[in-house]
Amino acid sequence: MARRGKSIIKGIEIDEIITVLNKAYADEWLAYYQYFIEAKVIKGIMKDAAIAELTLHAADELRHANLVADRIIQLGGTPLLNPNEWFTHTNCGYEEPKNFDVVSILKDSIKGEQCAISIYSQIAEMTRNKDIVTYDIVSQILADEVEHEEDLQALHDDITEFIEDIKKNMR
Ligand code: FE
Ligand code: FE
Ligand code: MG
């Protein structure tokens, strides 16, 4: 990393930042693929609304992977080079879609977002007042993950309420 950019990082080891960012990088790729494939296989009531949301989130996760990779390189590190490493470095794992119905898919995704929120808030705590640039990047990503959870939960609640209404009217 270039000298002046490095000199503003204080009270934290650069290698430690690179390690946590690489773990987040693995999470982002797995999250990207999870949304990508969920949007393909999802079935059932109001699935078009869900597909629209999942597709937007996939694009956001890929954008996050980009931001994190660029920061790792700026810090003098190397982003994970082999997709096999995504599974050994991930914090949040990969939730393989088992049940393709809209409600199950949304529940899987909400779980992933909750994990992402925990991880990015930890990295924000860790870098606050120590590495301002990483702190700023992870804070932006954290705001997106909070929005993702909110969007998915709202959609999940609308759909489950709609299903309940249909059941009531059938009685
Ligand atoms: Fe993300
Ligand atoms: Fe997300
Ligand atoms: Mg959204």
Image (spheres, helix red, strand yellow):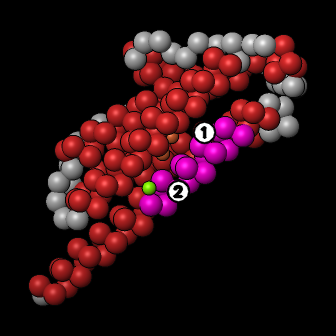
Q: Which is more toward the observer, 98 or 159?
A: 159
User: Label 2 neighbourhood size at 10 Å, few (<14), some (14-19), many (20+)?
Assistant: some
Q: Is residue 155 left or right of residue 80?
A: left
Give the amino acid at mark 1: Ile
Q: Give residue 118's position: percent from left, percent from top.
A: 60, 44
- Give the image quarter of residue 97: top left
- Give the image quarter of residue 41: top left
Q: Give residue 33's position: percent from left, percent from top.
A: 35, 34
Q: Give residue 32's position: percent from left, percent from top.
A: 39, 36
- Which residue occupies 54% across, 49% down? 145
Secondary element under disc 2, as helix, strand or loop, is helix
Q: Quadrant of the C terminus?
A: bottom left
Q: Which residues are magenta?
A: 136-151
Task: State the separation of the CA atoms marked 2 and 1.
Answer: 15 Å
* Ligand 3 under 8 Å from disc 2 Cβ: yes
Q: In the rendered image, is residue 114 in sight?
A: yes
Q: In the rendered image, is residue 122 in sight?
A: no
Q: Quadrant of the N terminus?
A: top right
Q: Main SS of the magenta segment?
A: helix
Reading the image, the residue beneath label 1 is 119
- Which residue occupies 55% across, 50% down? 144
State yes or no: residue 142 in magenta: yes
Reading the image, the residue beneath label 2 is 147
Give the amino acid at mark 2: Glu
Give the foreground label among 2 and 1: 2
- Which residue occupies 56% across, 54% down? 146
169 over 50 or under it: above or below:
below
